[in-house]
Image: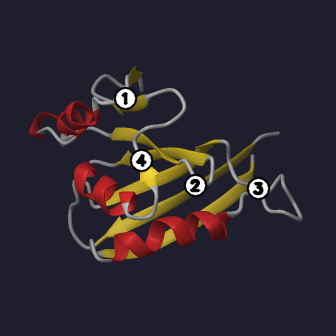
């Protein structure tokens, strides 16, 4: 059996990856994660992730926000260096819905480490996104 956790975020209108990254940066999030900067454009249904070195943030944001990629799922990894945790932000077609999956050193609950500390992730993600038109979220931690 495996465990999956994710938070689905719904916005009132389409957002850009760049705007979301800027909003989250104020709370300590960054594209710079332990492996560099990771992103994906699913234009071939293969979900091929790419990693580039630090300092290429603007190039990555230009690729994922390109008008040529609005009809595809795109994703970036974000990381909170002070917390030592991060994950993948997947932006769905239409860009008014994205999902966060805690895949980088997932934070577990102190009394039940096998469960994801969803409250921490929600407190770190939701407040900065409210000004961008976040209207709802759904958090799940499931045993498959």
Comparing marks 2 and 1, which lies closer to the viewer?
A: 1
Badge 4 density bin: few <14, some 14–19, many ≥20, Cα 10 Å: some
Tell me the residue that label 3 is attached to: 108
Disc on the earlier residue, 4 or 1: 4
Q: CA distance from mark 3 to mark 2?
A: 13 Å
* Of 73 and 111, the residue lying toward us: 111
Residue at image coords 36%, 30%: 40
Q: CA distance from mark 2 to mark 4?
A: 19 Å
Residue at image coords 27%, 48%: 93
35 relative position to 112: left or right: left
Please state the horizontal and vertical placement of residue 112, each as a whole percent of the image.
87, 60
Q: CA distance from mark 3 to mark 4?
A: 21 Å
Q: CA distance from mark 2 to mark 1?
A: 26 Å
Disc on the earlier residue, 3 or 4: 4
So how many labels did they put on this image?
Answer: 4
Comparing marks 1 and 3, which lies closer to the viewer?
A: 1
Please state the horizontal and vertical placement of residue 82, each as a whole percent of the image.
58, 53
Tell me the residue that label 2 is attached to: 6
Dot 3 falls on a residue whose secondary structure is loop
- Look at the numbered discs 3 and 4 and tell me whether their residues touch, using CB distance below 8 Å: no
Please state the horizontal and vertical placement of residue 76, each as a whole percent of the image.
39, 40
Residue at image coords 34%, 48%: 91
Please state the horizontal and vertical placement of residue 135, each as a whole percent of the image.
36, 77
Quarter occupied by the N terminus: top right
In the rendered image, which quarter is residue 31 located in? top left
Tell me the residue that label 4 is attached to: 30
Dot 2 falls on a residue whose secondary structure is strand
């Amino acid at each position: 059996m495996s465990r999956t956790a994710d938070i689905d975020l719904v916005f009132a209108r389409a957002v850009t990856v760049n705007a979301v990254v800027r909003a989250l940066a104020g709370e300590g999030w960054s594209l710079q994660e332990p492996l560099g900067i990771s992103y994906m454009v699913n234009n071939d249904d293969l979900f091929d992730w790419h990693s580039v070195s630090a300092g290429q943030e603007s190039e990555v944001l230009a690729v994922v926000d390109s008008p040529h990629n609005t009809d595809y799922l795109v994703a970036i990894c974000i990381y909170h260096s002070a917390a030592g945790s991060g994950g993948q932000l997947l932006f769905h077609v239409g860009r008014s819905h994205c999902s966060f999956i805690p895949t980088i050193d997932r934070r577990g609950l102190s009394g039940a480490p096998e469960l994801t500390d969803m409250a921490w992730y929600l407190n770190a993600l939701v407040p900065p996104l409210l000004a961008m038109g976040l209207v709802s979220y759904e958090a799940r931690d499931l045993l498959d």
